[in-house]
Amino acid sequence: MTVSKSPISAAPANFREVVAQNDVFISYSRRDKAFVETLDTALKNLNRDPWVDWEDIYKGEEWWKAIQRGIESANTFVFVISPDSVASAVCREEVSYAAECNKRFLPIVWREGFDPQQMHPAIASHNWLFFRETDDFNHALQELIRAMDTDLEHLRTHTRLLVRSHEWQSNARNSSYLLRGHDLQEAERWLKGLGKEPKPTALQTQFIDSSRDAETLAFKARQKAKRTVVLATVLVNMLLVTGASFWLYGAASGWARRWVDRQLQDALNVGLVGINGDEFEAIAYEPPTPANQEFYQNHQDWLVKVNIALPNAFPRTYAPTAPRAIIWVGDSLRDTEAQPISATRFRQPYIVDPTSQYWLAAGLIEPTITRTTYTDEFGSWLSICGPIQNSVGQVVGGLRVDFRADYVRQIEQQVRNRLLIAYVIVFIWLFILSLIILKATRPPTDSTSPKAANTSPP
């Protein structure tokens, strides 16, 4: 194929290569070469690009393939009619191939005296232009130019798609040679203009249809990939948010428990500050006396004050009487109606069960907090115990501060509720963010989609 002297500047940028086009292919007999040289020069003076075999076939190039490429790449097929060209087998083959390619024919009569019976049907069926020696050459040339320029854009597209379809076919119909994007849409719009001549060839139609099929498959693959990315992004975000929520819940629950522990410790410290160990020893281990009654009342008043200052804390005191038995000495709930069921009586005995034995006994040595909720006849609790000492440093009893378990559960539930709200908000935000990222990374207009192709303007 010849190198184009005037490449079509309107060819799309996504072509595999720039398609070389010629304005006209001139088929002639060698005996008419002088006339063809004159016609070639005249066309070039008018900035037209004719294809002629003496200058557009490279040395060493296979002659007939070069002729075929010249016909394919030309917008118009001009046949110089003379007795010699009509009788030429080579000229007849050129005309047949041009007819196979649905080329526009412009026959011009140079010399008469030919046998009409030998005329190729594709030439005989078209109007002729006359360039005989007796005709006005310039006038005939203008008529030829006007005919060549009729529906020129349609012709150029026809030529371009013909070259591309032959390239596709010659490469075993490899999908990499198919049309894409706007180039495909332009070809489909051109294919719909079936009222114009020349009509598309069967190969051109197959080429465009195969391009659309490949583009549709590619579009569906991209859509599936996008859905996969969205799903994967959502699942990953869900796992991340869920993992983070579990971690935060554990951290928040730990914080809540540490906060309760601090509250218990503070309540224990406050309670121990106001307890007189000697008075406690007198009311816990000696027979009741008027003085003991005063000590008891002072002791009770202080426990009530601790409860008033720390409403969630319920302090009570105890003294050991046997390895697994204690008596309750003081109780902040005694003589009140706030918690009549869980209130203890003065010197009420209590058999220590194995579960609470350890920490009650440990509380007589150092402050000890229960690490799990426990239940007794008074309810479910979290508690802390600490030793009560007399003036000489002897441990004479213990102070127990109870926090109701439902209070701790209430704190944990509040933490769960807030984390759930935060989880939903973060999950929705991450989902929206994923969609925004996918949209931002997508081309502004996916013009290759089947919908886009079907809604393209005419």
Image (cartoon, grey):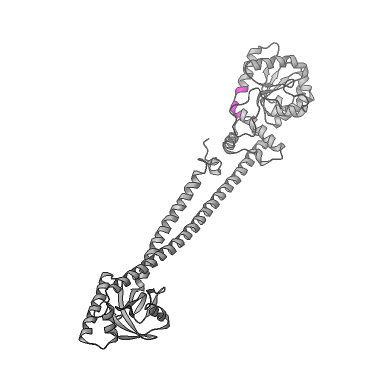
Q: Position of residue 35 (x, y in %)?
A: 72, 14
Residue at 62% across / 43% down in the picture?
A: 214
The answer to whether residue 365 is visible is yes
Relative to residue 217, is residue 287 drawn left or right?
A: left
The front one of 204 and 15 is 15
The front one of 321 and 282 is 282
- The quarter of the picture where residue 65 lies is top right
Give the extent of the magenta segment: 148-154
Residue projecting furthest to the bottom = 287
Q: Position of residue 34 (x, y in %)?
A: 74, 14
Relative to residue 38, is residue 355 drawn left or right?
A: left
- The quarter of the picture where residue 397 lies is bottom left
Residue at 34% across / 68% down in the picture?
A: 263
Point out the image quarter for the N terminus. top right
The front one of 265 and 125 is 265
Relative to residue 276, is residue 427 drawn left or right?
A: right
Report the predominant secondary structure element of the magenta stretch: helix
Q: Is residue 432 above or below residue 108?
A: below
Residue projecting furthest to the front = 392
Q: Is residue 150 magenta?
A: yes
The front one of 326 and 312 is 326
Q: Is residue 194 above or below residue 414?
A: above
Q: Is residue 125 above or below residue 205?
A: above
Relative to residue 261, is residue 452 drawn left or right?
A: right
Residue at 75% across / 16% down in the picture?
A: 33
Q: Position of residue 415 (x, y in %)?
A: 38, 64
Q: Is residue 361 magenta?
A: no
Q: Position of residue 160 (x, y in %)?
A: 64, 31
